[in-house]
Structure formats: C-alpha cells, structure tokens
Image: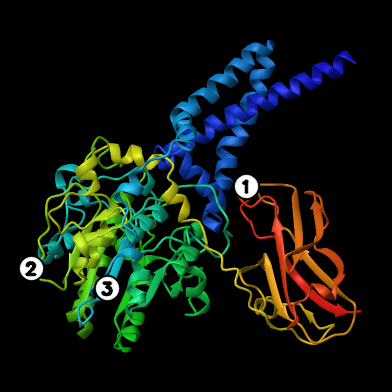
Amino acid sequence: MQKLKIFITDLIVFAVLFISVAALFMLIRTNMIWGNVSIEQILINMVEANNLAAKQIMHEYILYTLLPAIVICFLLQCVIKHYRWLLLISLLCLAYCSFKLDLVSYIRNQHVYSELYEQEYVNPEDISFHFPENKQNLIIIHMESMEKNYADANLSGENLLPGLTELSKYGLSFDDFYQLQHQDYTLAGMIASYCAVPYKSIKNTNYTMFNNFMPALVCLPQVLQQNGYNTYFMKGATLDFSRTGIFFSSHGMKDLVGQDELATRFGLDPEINRGSQWGFKDSILYSLAKNRLTEIAKNNQPFLFSMLTVDNHGPNLFVDNQCLTTQNPQKDVIRCADKMVVDFVKWIMSQSFYQNTTVVIVGDHIKTGLNNLYPNEKNRQIVNLILNPKNKNLTAYDHRWTTLDLSPSILQAIGVDFADGKFGLGRSLFESSPTLLDKLGPELDNELHKASKVYEQFNTIVKTFTPLYNAYPQWGTSLDTPEMLQTYASFSDEEFNLLWLDTLSFTLPQTTADTITLNMQFKILFMANLARNIEVFANNQKIASWSFKYDVKQPITKTLTFNRNLLTDDNKLLLEFKADTPGASFVSVGLGIKSFRLDNN
C-alpha cells in the first residue's frame, strides 16, 4: 500500500513538473520563432490555426519541446529525491511563463472596461459616405511581413527594395508608423486595416462562431459593396487558416480564392506550384491575379481587388527560383518580393483600367519578433504606398499612425467624402486632425488591452424572431436536409450538414386530430459547457424540458406529443428551443436539426 502511495505521488509530481517545464520550453521556442507573442494571440491561434502549415508547426513543437521536456523531467526526478525542490522548479517555470506573457495584466484586463470605444469609435453604419460620380477601382496588395526599413542601406547593408523605392516617387507614403500589439500578425493586421479595430479574443455572446466573424462589425469591403462595388480577395494559403475566409465573407468580400480554390477552380497543381509550407508561391498568385483583373475589368463596374502574399511568411521563408542568389535567404526573399510586386504594379499601370484605379501596397505587419537584419532597430515601419489616388491634390500630413488608420485613408484616396475622415477607431492620414495615436500616445495600446462593452457587441447577431410560418408539407413528410429546414427557421447557421437553430415555424395542414406528434433527430454541440438543459415551447407554452450530459449519445431522437388546441386559429405553430447556457457557450443556439417530422394522430 505504501509503495502504491509513493508511486501515485511520484506520478502527480512528475505531471506537475512536466506541465511547467513543457510550458517553459514551448514559450522559449515561440519567442525564438515569433518573438514576444501575447497570451491573447496564442489563445486565438490555438482555436483558429487549423491548416496543414499550422499542424506541421505543432508537430515541430512536439518534437522540440514536449519530448525534451519528458526527458528532462525524468532526469530531474531521478536526481532530485525531495518533492519540494521539484515543485519549486515547477513553480519557477510557471512564474517565468506568467511574467513573459504578462498573464496578470491579461486576466485583469478581462474585467477592466475601457471607455475608449464609447468616446472615439465612429460606427461606419452611422457615416454618410459620398462617392464620386465616377467611382474609382481599388486594388490592395498586402505584402507579408514587409518592412519599409529594408530600403535603408544603413540598416540592411543595401537597399533591398529598389523597385518600391523608385515606385514611391509616383505615390504617397507615410512614416511614423507604430504597431499595436493586436495588429502584429496577419489576420489581426488585416482586421485593423479593413475594420479600424484591433482583433481580440472576447467572450462569444449569443452568436454562432461557424459562419460568422464579428458579425455586427462593419468594415471597408462592406461599405464598398453597399455602394456598387464588386469585391474580390485572393491569397495563396488556405482560407481556413485563422478563419480568414469566414472573416472576409462576413464583411463584404463576395469572391474568395485561397489554396483550395486555386487548385479546384483554376486547375493549379498544389505540389508543382507550392512555395512555402503555407501554400502557393507568390509568382503563381501574381500571374493569376493578372488574368483575373483582366476579366474583372471587362464588367465595367467598380471593383475592390485585394490580395495577400505569403512567400515572406515565417518561420520557413520561400525564395522563388527567379530570385535565388548565394546571399542571405532573408535578403533574397525580400528582393524577390520587391521585384514581383513592382512588376505586377507596372503591368497594372499599362492596363486601360488603371486610369480610374487606385493601387495600395501595404505590409500586413512588421516581421514578427526581432528582425535579424537589424535586431537593434526600434523604429520599424511597414511598407505603405498609395498610387493614383482619385484626388491628385491629397496632402499626406505628418501623423503618428497605426494600421487602424488605413481604412479612412484609403477611402479618401479613392475620392470618398465623409465627416472628418473618421472610420471606426481610424483617422484619415489626409486630414490635419490628430490620429488616436497622436492624441493618446502609448496609452492607446493600454486602453485597447482592456475589455470593452462596445467591442463585445461586434460579436453579437441581433436575432430576428419574426416567425416565417411557411406552409408545411403534408403530415408525415420528413424534413431531413438543411435546405428543407431552412424554410422554417427564423435564425439558423448551417454547419456540419446540420441546421443549427433555436426556432422553427410552420403553417400546418388542416387536421381534426386531437394531438400532434413531433418526431425529431438532432445534435447538441457541447463547447464551453458540457451539460445542456433545453426547454421546448409550442406557441409560447412549454411542452418539454430536456436535460443532457456531455456523454449523451448523438444524434438524439425525441418524440413529443401535444394538444392541437395549442395551434392558432389559422393553424400556425411556433416552436422554440431555449438553452439555459447561451452566454457561456460558444454556441448558444439550441439544436442542430438532422431530421424533423410532424404527424397528426
């Protein structure tokens, strides 16, 4: 018995030691690859980074952190016989991780609310946008991790961006950029540049996460689409990574092309055309972009065409064959990115549609972590250049700015007039009035770290519970596809070949039967909460209470019987499924309907 107790104690101590040492190793490796990553970015990417490249990185983490942690913990437990010293080592590891991730501030900021949005956020829904009569096309090229500093020979040893340096003589560019913490990776940088808000992990309140991405937030592509623009987005990596596709499709981009679409819609072989582990190489992307722009321009409608490069995405850069030299691969990939984007822009300039097209070239963020070419440089700037603005007399004022300020600046560059150049938390750099960074300085970053009631509302869908009351098929007819069920659902979200919903409404066939039977098969998605209680209402009268635990066998089959007297005089039926845990779960809708049948008995 004594040996068993010792074994169990050893096992528990080893588990605690392993968790702490593994956390330390993972943090160290993360800092080596990505720099000082915030706990918020780690949490977001744990949930959303789900493509092949992300899985490969996770495999490398297992190889380089978890396996060494197991070996070291085993050796420590063999050498150190006193539990208190092993536990002290564990505590020190966890304390260091907490300090590096600033965990205390993160936890505190989840409960400290800022008034910044109430005071400074300008909702695009409330803005009157005045577009010119002849609308300007817009092409936005997001260059992965591309810094303006690469053109500084004093920092890089040579000008690595000769093409962009020459091109900048014909456009507008801004200095004094400052990168906020919630803008320091691709998706966060693009959300900031299109929506003028940072990207933060927040509570998912009263919405489904599958087909919606901050659904109450209004972004630049939506504004353009609502004013007659066709909208397109293209990248070489998969649209699934970080839910990029869901973000853009939720915010005004109607034609989306990623790695899968490049293979299926355009017949490109992923293996032959692959660049880095992230997806198709940029040379292929630029080549296809020319073809697509040629077709898009034939429509004679204003358009937004946005694209994102990937060759310069760490940790494994891709140097295209056309750019290989004997020098530093990091320099090669930067030179190559410069050459390809300038060749592409020169092609655009040679096209007839360029005369009414504004081109924006911008880095999505500065390179993560320290830049090996100039590790001591603090004043790091993203590439940014606006070519052929609608208003040739625009003045670029000297501002301290962030990615938040790009949307209003781009809108003014294509000739859109709106009050004071304010959009979200962004302020146009073509206005003399201060940006938020001018106004608040470093305090802006501190305020954006805090929680916000306004920001939380971006993640909320305002549900319409207006019953549809479409005519139900004949009694005994099964509805067993999302398309069939959609006709009767006031609010729903299709995913996993199910229709996730919390209301159904019908106009039923005439009947003289006393009772109606409800036969249904459904699933419940357990996310934050393992248990779920659901109440079923028929025309506002409760007809059932269901209680489920996490181990319920799914799909679930239920049969309910209720009196015909519950129907209205015109035979209408509203069914509501009310879950008791809407705010605490990622998914607040009650059920994922698989099949449904109503019978009269």
* Nearest to N terminus: mark 3 or mark 2: 3
Give the residue drawn at x 44%, y 35%. 112
Mark 2 surroundings: few (<14), some (14-19) or many (≥20) residues within 10 A = few
Which numbered disc covers residue 138?
3
Say if residue 367 shows up in the picture: no
Give the residue drawn at x 82%, y 53%. 552
Depth order, front residue of 291/63: 291
Q: Position of residue 30 (x, y in %)?
A: 47, 39
Which numbered disc covers residue 393?
2
Q: Position of residue 182 (x, y in %)?
A: 38, 46
Q: Which residue lies under the disc numbered 1?
A: 584
Q: Nearer the viewer, mark 3 or mark 2?
A: 2
The quadrant where residue 169 appears:
bottom left
Residue 199 against residue 302 in the figure, above or below: above
The quadrant where residue 127 appears:
bottom left
Residue type, label 1: Ala
Depth order, front residue of 178/536: 536
* Nearest to N terminus: mark 1 or mark 2: 2
Decide if residue 579 is on the left or right side of residue 308: right
Q: Position of residue 596 (x, y in %)?
A: 78, 74
As drawn, which residue projects farthest toward the front?
569
Label 1 – label 2 distance at C-alpha: 52 Å
Q: Secondary structure at mark 3?
A: strand
Q: Secondary structure at mark 1?
A: loop
Q: Position of residue 404 (x, y in %)?
A: 30, 53
Q: Secondary structure at mark 2?
A: loop
Mark 1 surroundings: few (<14), some (14-19) or many (≥20) residues within 10 A = some
- Label pair 3/2, CB-CB below 8 angstroms: no
Depth order, front residue of 399/580: 580
